[in-house]
Image (spheres, rainbow, N blue to C red):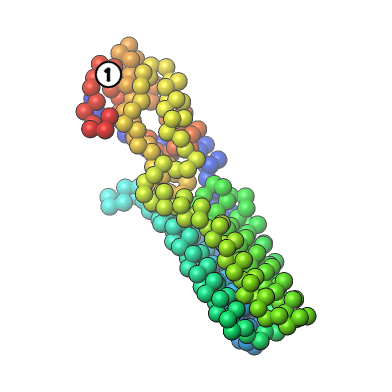
Amino acid sequence: MSADHDHSHHHHHHDHAPKLDQVNTAFIVGIILNSVFVIIEVIAGLATHSLSLLTDAGHNLSDVAGLALALLAFKLTKVNSNNNYTFGYKRSTIIVSFFNALILFVAVGFIGYEAIMRFLAPETVDGGVMAWVAFIGIGINAFTAWLFVKDKDKDLNVKGAYLHMAVDAIVSLGVVVSGVIIYFTKWYWVDSVVSLIIAIVILKGTWSLLMDSLRLEMAGVPKAIEIENIKNELLKCKGVLDVHHMHVWALSTTDNAITAHVVIAPEFVSTFENIKKDLRHRLEHLNIQHSTLEPEFADEDCKQPDC
């Protein structure tokens, strides 16, 4: 029996996905604000010989690059499919979320290295200027993180952007605290201690992002989806005796797909179109938007090797 290919695009599933226009605006505002702040930090860092501000500027620059990559990925999701890329460029969102996690890890390594170097050879820093510039950074990063907070659990790229900005706000707070302490005590080593603490905080927040994106890169089942839950839900459909040879994977950070063999009771074979509609409806409520379902007779042996 021939397979039924259904790539449904019903709109009610978008409850699971962030609104593109809203997210695009958040990315553009974030890129502009953080680019301006990088310039401010570089000028202030060079003027005050503050290695801390220059390091943070480099970290913020990596965030601007991450935001730009994520924005590009979102733009690519709107590009139509073609003969070479039959799902379009949706998967670019997964690739970008993975690279964003890697960028954060590189930034952590850089911060950690600089912190140890400064601890071994403390630099004389203007704590006052350092604190004021970092204070501005708290406002910019916290505001940018707020732009993403609503959609952070709907998409890995938005979550990555939120983490970048939230972490930067924490970094800036750490720089403010160390700047104030240095200003009053001249304990220059405090800067290094705070930087190392910040690096640990970043690592903790980034690990889950890296694992989630790597899972999707490996065509693993998306974290929020349980295979058994899908099977149990599909078996509730009248006329369905069994569901097997199931494969579930992510097409993008918001769209998921499934292929499965559906065993139909003999008396329901002629009404498979109705069964298919019911199955699609159930799948969409489980955040699976693309389905390819192959019907089988109850007495038919599945020929697939892993059935």
Rendered location of residue 197, percent (x, y): 62, 66
Tell me if 183 is positioned left or right of 278 in this view: right
Rendered location of residue 187, percent (x, y): 71, 80
Residue beneath the point at 30% across and 13% down: 266
Camera sees residue 161: no
Locate the C terminus and report the quarter of the image it occupies. Answer: top left
Instruction: Kindly give the residue lying farthest to the right in the view shown.
Output: 184
Camera sees residue 212: yes
Mark 1 lies on a secondary structure that is strand
Residue beneath the point at 47% across and 46% down: 254
Residue beneath the point at 75% across and 76% down: 180
Quarter of image, res 98: bottom left
- Amino acid type at mark 1: Phe
Closer to us: 219 or 175: 175
* Above/below status of 114 relative to 97: below
Instruction: Kindly give the residue lying farthest to the top in the view shown.
Output: 267
Rendered location of residue 53, percent (x, y): 62, 78
Q: Which residue is mark 1?
A: 297
